[in-house]
């Protein structure tokens, strides 16, 4: 019998799952979801996994876009994309910069 992540109970007494990859994000001042839920979830995943792979937790200052500036949103997306690229074995190759015409 195989178990999908949505079927795994994280409250069972004898939990042993193999979490392949996980990145949990939360906002410290999110008015909708307290950040401790993400912290507890990530800790429980980390304790329960038998894969030996890390479970990453990223806590930002805002939450659900509230109080987050453009820099925070860009930093979150950069971290998510970097995590996904790393786990997929992709490498970053910067594009060559276009030549800038000389000023006269």
Image (cartoon, rainbow, N blue to C red):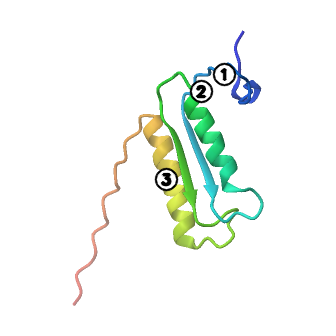
Q: Which residue is mark 1?
A: 15
SS at badge 3:
helix
SS at badge 1:
loop
Q: Is residue 62 above or below residue 12?
A: below
Looking at the rendered image, the disc whose residue lies closer to the viewer, 3 or 2, is 2
Q: Is residue 5 above or below residue 58?
A: above
The residue most toward the front is 13
Q: Nearer the viewer, residue 48 or 75?
A: 48
Residue at the location (37% across, 47% down)?
A: 92
Instruction: Count neighbours of disc 2 (C-alpha within 10 A) and say few if under 14, some if 14 to 19, many if 20 or more.
Output: some
Q: CA distance from mark 3 to mark 2?
A: 24 Å
Q: Earlier in the sequence, mark 2 or mark 1?
A: 1
The answer to which quarter of the image holds residue 76 is bottom right
SS at badge 2:
helix
Q: Is residue 83 left or right of residue 91?
A: right
Q: Is residue 58 above or below residue 50?
A: below
Q: Earlier in the sequence, mark 3 or mark 2?
A: 2
Q: CA distance from mark 1 to mark 3?
A: 29 Å
Q: Which residue is mark 3?
A: 79
Q: Are marks 2 and 1 in contact (CB under 8 Å)?
A: yes
Instruction: Count neighbours of disc 3 (C-alpha within 10 A) and say few if under 14, some if 14 to 19, many if 20 or more.
Output: some
Instruction: Count neighbours of disc 1 (C-alpha within 10 A) and say few if under 14, some if 14 to 19, many if 20 or more.
Output: some
Please state the horizontal and vertical placement of residue 50, each as a whole percent of the image: 53, 21
Please state the horizontal and vertical placement of residue 14, each as a whole percent of the image: 67, 19
Residue at the location (71% across, 30% down)?
A: 10
Please state the horizontal and vertical placement of residue 35, each as a whole percent of the image: 66, 55
Looking at the rendered image, the disc whose residue lies closer to the viewer, 1 or 3, is 1
Q: Quadrant of the N terminus?
A: top right
Q: Which residue is mark 2?
A: 48
């Amino acid at each position: 019998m195989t178990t999908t992540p949505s079927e795994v109970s994280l409250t069972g007494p004898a939990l042993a799952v193999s979490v392949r990859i996980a990145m949990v994000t939360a906002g410290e001042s999110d008015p909708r979801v307290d950040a401790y839920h993400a912290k507890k979830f990530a800790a429980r995943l980390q304790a329960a996994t038998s894969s030996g792979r890390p479970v990453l937790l990223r806590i930002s200052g805002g939450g659900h876009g509230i109080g987050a500036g453009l820099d925070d949103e860009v930093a979150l997306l950069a971290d998510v994309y970097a995590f996904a690229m790393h786990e997929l074995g992709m490498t970053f190759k910067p594009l060559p910069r276009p030549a800038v015409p000389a000023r006269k």
